[in-house]
Image (cartoon, rainbow, N blue to C red):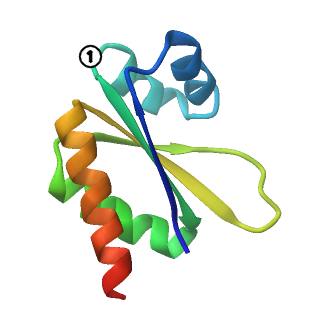
Amino acid sequence: MIITRIIHAPRPSTVALLLRRTAKESKKLVEDTHFAAIGLLQTDLPSLFYYTDIGQKAGNVIAIEIVGNCPQHVNTMAFFGSNEAVNATMSAITAADKQK
């Protein structure tokens, strides 16, 4: 099972919320980059790696893992990029999930 969401024109406080849950190296990738949208993917860890690869191949996005404590071992990935790139990324992930 996957859960996906797209945030178009994210507000600075929303970006700050996400970046507080990322590694320092990942923050650096996003802090100096202009992006218009954020795609969010939540799923189990093996699927997260699989769908992240599919998503990055579909759109010019920066993929950042969102770290948190989830007792169900559900993980989240954020894809930062243009509206078009994030839409392409999330569409590819959704299509791949339907094919399995």
Tell me: 29 left or right of 40.
left
Amino acid type, mark 1: His
- Numbered-mark total: 1
Q: Position of residue 6 (x, y in %)?
A: 42, 41
Vertical placement of 54 versus 30: above or below? below
Q: Nearer the viewer, residue 95 or 66?
A: 95
Vertical placement of 81 versus 1: above or below? above
Few, some or many C-alpha atoms within 10 Å of disc 1 (few <14, some 14-19, many ≥20)? few
Determine which quarter of the picture holds residue 19: top right
The residue at which mark 1 appears reads as 34
Tell me: 89 left or right of 67.
left
Residue extending farthest to the bottom is 100
Q: Residue at x 55, y 75 (%)?
A: 1
Q: Residue at x 37, y 88 (%)?
A: 100
Determine which quarter of the picture holds residue 7: top left
Q: Secondary structure at mark 1?
A: loop
Vertical placement of 92 versus 79: above or below? below
Vertical placement of 1 versus 17: above or below? below
Q: Residue at x 31, y 85 (%)?
A: 99
Q: Position of residue 82 (x, y in %)?
A: 22, 30
Q: Position of residue 26 (x, y in %)?
A: 44, 32
Q: Residue at x 35, y 59 (%)?
A: 52
